[in-house]
Amino acid sequence: MILLGSNSVKQLFHRAVVSRRNTVLSLCAEFPSTISNGIGHKESNLLQHDSRLIHTTMQLKDDNDNVHGDDNGLHPILKEARTCSTSDHLQSDCTHLWHPYTSLVSPTPVLPVRSADGVKITLETGDVLLDGMSSWWAVIHGYNSTELNNAMEEQLSKMSHVMFGGFTHRPAVELAKLLIHITPPALEKVFLVDSGSVAVEVALKMAIQYWRGGKGRGIEGGKNKICSVRGGYHGDTLGAMSVCDPDTGMHSTLFPPEQETMLPRQVFVSRPPCDLRKRIGDSLAGCQRCICNNTISGNEEALEASLDNMQKTLAEQHESLAALILEPIVQGAGGMRFYPSKYLKRARELCDEYNLLLICDEIATGFGRSGNDTLFACEHAGVTPDILCLGKALTGGYMTLGAVLATTKVAEKVSASDNDGVALPLMHGPTFMGNPLACAVAVASTNKLLRMDPTSGVPFWKSRINAIEGYLQKGLAEVHCIPGVADVRVGGAIGVIEMKEPLDGAKVTQRCVDFGVWLRPFGRLLYTMPPYVMSEKEVLQVTGAMVKLAEEASKD
């Protein structure tokens, strides 16, 4: 007979409470009649209390078996859906599901994913793909990370959700303190939201409310428009759409100039030229709608022209402008363009001069992605925005979550009227605001980024971003020689090939499967934002596929 002493029992049930329920189940199954022997009266209370957890966990296991094995209690619709062939599964998807940025009339083909682990995605067909997209730039630690899984499991054993109105919890407070610590100085107030687009919505709402009732600030409430930069992208919700490029952006069909639309009309300034230091190769045509004549002198002139345009616009319209919003250093989904830090620095100065708030949208660029040994792109220019938007990589791609950080000055003026001192609530409260699961995994993801790399002696994020930037530069070094290539650029963990002609997305997707990688091009752009944990061999496999795709597209 095997006896378990009091310490063993305590340890056993502690593991069960935290995350190791499967271990408890296996031990209980192996020693069903001996687990309670060898303990005293005091310990028996512990056993009686924690036996309820055993019973509950056993029931969860039984329920799980019912779902994935025995179909007892499983709805017929679900039984059919879980046992149908891959072709039937795809047909149901095509019939019923709307995927991002596609039409139901002629939907973009999709691939059936079975599982994902590390930097690899396994399809139901058995094909395995290296993920060159980090699932839209979010899965920075790869899939099925043990550390992030454990954080989720531990939090799940406590609570998966509780409303944030009237309650708080430790994961939310921990995340806020961590974000305040790692972001530029003076950003000391945090508003948690559902996603990146919603972060932009809240930032815009903050900026407008900052000037509300602003008699004491020399205005009469007329600062109710936003200034944005052409070539920018800030999300797909209504407010965010209104500050995307109205002429060349993906939402341009909703901006017919001759018609009134549901979107507010904002003010736009010229986009900056590209940062030529990020370019790989000479004698290239340049990026789409290049404004610098593809020369160093032309680039400098274009930078001055874009800044002059910004100054002139703010000088003429500052009385109606609440804020300037921009993506620092990298314009993401609007063209994957890098631009000089001088533009960002001058934008900060002009906002101060003409009394506008500066909103930096770091949803795509934050957490090291843009390189230059900084966690956030606005730090390239030594700039602190008044409001900062975060998302995507915030949770390591595990949960949807965004955050808006603001200075104390902004937060206080958003929250109180100058006229009578009455508190003004910020009227935004998503149902899943501050979700404990999302906050817990965001804390774990950020902590993992900040941990020192024992080999390099620098934080994990810095070591990995610098390494990946080198791999991308190596893998894309000769792409500029391909006739159909217009531009090649690398910055941080971002690698971009811009073609002279648009790519056939469906064809590229199929060829990616043939090459064993996952990329999602758009327009003329073939790009990668790999997970930070990719090895050199894996990154070079991704860039190798990009080179082959560029070669094939040049021949079409």
Image (cartoon, rainbow, N blue to C red):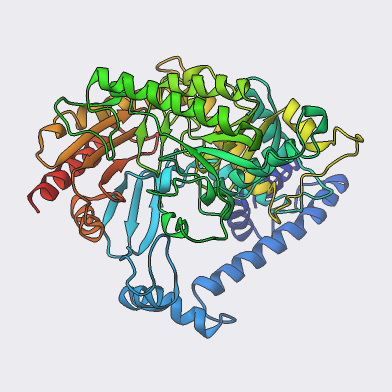
Q: Find residue 495 and report its image quarter.
A: top left
Q: Relative to 388, is 33 above or below? A: below
| Closer-to-camera residue (522/474) | 522
In the rendered structure, the answer to whether residue 24 lies left or right of residue 448 reads right
| Left or right: where 17 falls relative to 293 | right
Picture coordinates of residue 99, whole percent (x, y): 42, 64
Depth check, front residue: 539 or 319: 319
Q: What residue is shown at x 45% (from left), y 58% (from top)?
A: 256
* Residue 19 shows in the view: no
In the rendered image, residue 81, in percent from the top left (x then y), is placed at 45, 78
- Percent x, y of residue 533: 38, 34
**Residue displayed at 58% across by 37% down:** 389
Image coordinates of residue 67 in percent, x first then y, are 54, 73
Residue 253 visible here: yes
Q: Residue furthest top?
A: 457
Asked whether 36 or 200 is in front, the reply is: 200
Q: Would you place residue 66 above or below residue 234 in this image?
A: below
Q: Which residue is most to the bottom?
A: 76
Residue beneath the point at 59% across and 34% down: 317
- The residue at the point 77 percent across, 28 percent down is 218
Quadrant in the picture for the C terminus = bottom left
Left or right: 78 as drawn, with respect to 336: right
Vertical order, 213 against 472 (above or below): below
